Image: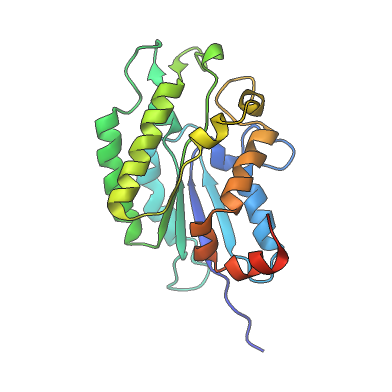
Amino acid sequence: MTLSIPRKLIVVGDSGVVGWGDPEEGGWCERLRRHWMALPEGPVLYPLGVRGDGLERVAARLQAEVSCRGELRRQLPQGILLAVGLNDSARIGRRDGRPQLDPDAFLFGLQQLLSQARQLAPVLVLGLTPVDEAVMPYADVLWYGLEQVRRYEGLLEEACLEADVPFLPLLEALLADPAWLQWLSPDGIHLNSEGHRQVFKRVQRWPALLQWADLQPLAAATGSP
């Protein structure tokens, strides 16, 4: 009997991918990894998050992250999910300070990153999560704001539309729930366990990701939410 080789997805991003803030189940990415591991044909997922990473750091390590996780000789992962941008939106030093990465530079860098990533494997991109402006600054130096987060998520969507890359917006869907502030950790930027669960629910149901994972028939058959 020949065992099928599962497809592999690497998730490259920041502390959201690490699962920071979720001591219960390790974050939305870890929840997805466990969910897929329990499925007969579920893909293998590699969460490759680094706290504090922005677009430039993700771009710098992407090639190395992809090249060493094919598992078998001369193979590469079959998919890349990018989850980055929140740290780039933060303003330095004061509420109206300069952003960590200027919007024009962010868009240009993102366009370059998508071009690079698409040469390695099919790419998907995740949107950004809310922040609590009332508790800023973070670490006494970084000011995160909803207006900036909204702008940078818009740039993510713009670049993905231009490159024909699947994109899952998160910000407005999360903000639409009156309880969204209760999904954040006390620092105002990291999701707590409930926040990660909310993101996991949306990622788990994402049609583009289900199609990539070839899990649509399974989801329909099992009545997955």
Residue 84 placement, left or right of 44: left
Check the image and name the residue furthest to the bottom. Answer: 1
Q: Residue at x 63, y 26 (%)?
A: 178
Specify the quadrant of the image occupied by residue 28.
Answer: top right
- Is residue 198 depicted above or below 95 in this figure? below
Q: Is residue 224 left or right of residue 117?
A: right
Residue 117 visible in rendering: yes
Q: Can I make out residue 215 in this image?
A: no
Q: How is the image coloured?
A: rainbow
Query: How far from the left and from the top, in percent, is residue 193?
Result: 69, 35
Q: Residue at x 65, y 66 (%)?
A: 220
Quadrant location, the N terminus: bottom right
Q: Establish if 47 lies above or below 101.
A: below
Horizontal side, residue 34 vs residue 138: left or right: right
Residue for point 57% across, 21% down: 188
The residue lying toward the viewer, choosing from 42 and 173, is: 173
Residue 219 in percent (x, y) is at 65, 64
Q: Nearer the viewer, residue 198 or 91?
A: 198
> Which quarter of the figure is the C terminus placed in?
bottom right
Does 63 sit above or below residue 41? above
What number of labels is visible? Answer: 0
Q: Residue 123's x, y, as percent? A: 41, 56
* Quadrant of res 106: top left
Residue 30 is situated, as x and y percent measured from the top left of the image, at: 64, 48
**Residue at figure coordinates x 55%, y 29% from the top left:** 175
Q: Which of 204/135 is in front?
A: 204
